[in-house]
Image: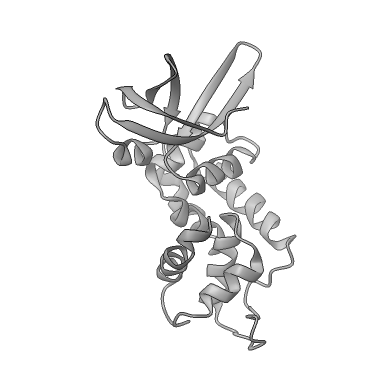
């Protein structure tokens, strides 16, 4: 229903903010990451939103970037991950770290978030890895547009992670191929996101 809100930040609490648009104050639940990136109260802010509707309430969730919004929607699409758990994960981890955890099958890192035990963390990795695999991306082999195959596991995992974050496999492979395949997965993801920042 609402894609984004642009207005004056009039109130903040650790779990939510209020943005006034056209005289109406919209309460948006947010992550700690988003809160750290907000301007001061009284200044203009733009946040990307997701509305969660249930029988007894309609709640709005706000994120400072489209990537964080997409990562939140991806996480809450997993069985057992509700809105609060989704916020808890993204308060503890960046979207890049979530994507890297999924791409490298590292469920332990997800348990750093409140409300995420080992079983739920494993389910998140399993379900989201399956989604990536259904997109026909090889976990160990990436073929850049130039047609040169790279057998680097780090490259494959970085491409998978970028795909989890919503980029097309072709675009992700092309950008990751520009960097040294010996770099750690998270560094490849960070550099690739920086290079693709204008293409969100």
Q: Quarter of the image holding residue 25?
A: top left
| Residue furthest bottom in the image | 148
* Apparent side of residue 78 relative to residue 176 in the rendered image (left or right): right
Query: Is 25 or 36 nearer to us in this picture?
Result: 25
The residue shown at (37%, 34%) is: 45
Looking at the picture, how far across and down is residue 159, in whole percent? Answer: 57, 68
Query: Is 37 or 3 nearer to us in this picture?
Result: 3
The residue shown at (48%, 60%) is: 198
Q: Is residue 126 above or below residue 137?
A: above
Q: How is the image coloured?
A: one colour
Q: Is residue 150 above or below residue 138?
A: below
* Apparent side of residue 132 relative to residue 111 in the rendered image (left or right): right
Looking at the picture, how far across and down is residue 185, in whole percent? Answer: 46, 70
Q: Is residue 22 above or below residue 106?
A: above
Looking at the picture, how far across and down is residue 123, in whole percent? Answer: 61, 47
Looking at the picture, how far across and down is residue 108, in whole percent? Answer: 46, 53
Q: Is residue 101 above or below residue 82?
A: below
Q: Quarter of the image holding residue 173?
A: bottom right
């Amino acid at each position: 229903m609402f894609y984004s809100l642009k207005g004056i930040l009039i109130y903040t609490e650790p779990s939510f903010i209020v943005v006034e648009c056209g005289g109406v104050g919209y309460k948006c639940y947010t992550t700690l990451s988003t809160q750290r990136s907000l301007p001061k109260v009284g200044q203009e802010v733009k946040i990307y939103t997701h509305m969660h509707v249930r029988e007894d309430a309609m709640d709005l969730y706000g994120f400072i970037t489209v990537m964080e919004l997409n990562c939140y929607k991806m996480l809450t699409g997993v069985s057992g991950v509700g809105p609060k758990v989704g916020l808890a994960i993204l308060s503890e981890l960046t979207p890049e770290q979530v994507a890297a955890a999924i791409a490298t099958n590292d469920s332990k890192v997800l348990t750093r978030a409140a409300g995420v035990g080992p079983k739920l963390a494993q389910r998140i990795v399993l379900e989201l890895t399956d989604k990536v695999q259904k997109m026909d991306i090889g976990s160990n082999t990436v073929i850049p547009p130039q047609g040169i195959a790279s057998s680097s596991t780090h490259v494959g995992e970085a491409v998978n992670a970028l795909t989890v974050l919503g980029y097309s496999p072709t675009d992700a492979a092309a950008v990751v191929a520009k960097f040294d395949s010996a770099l750690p997965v998270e560094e490849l993801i960070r550099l690739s996101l920086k290079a693709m920042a204008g293409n969100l």
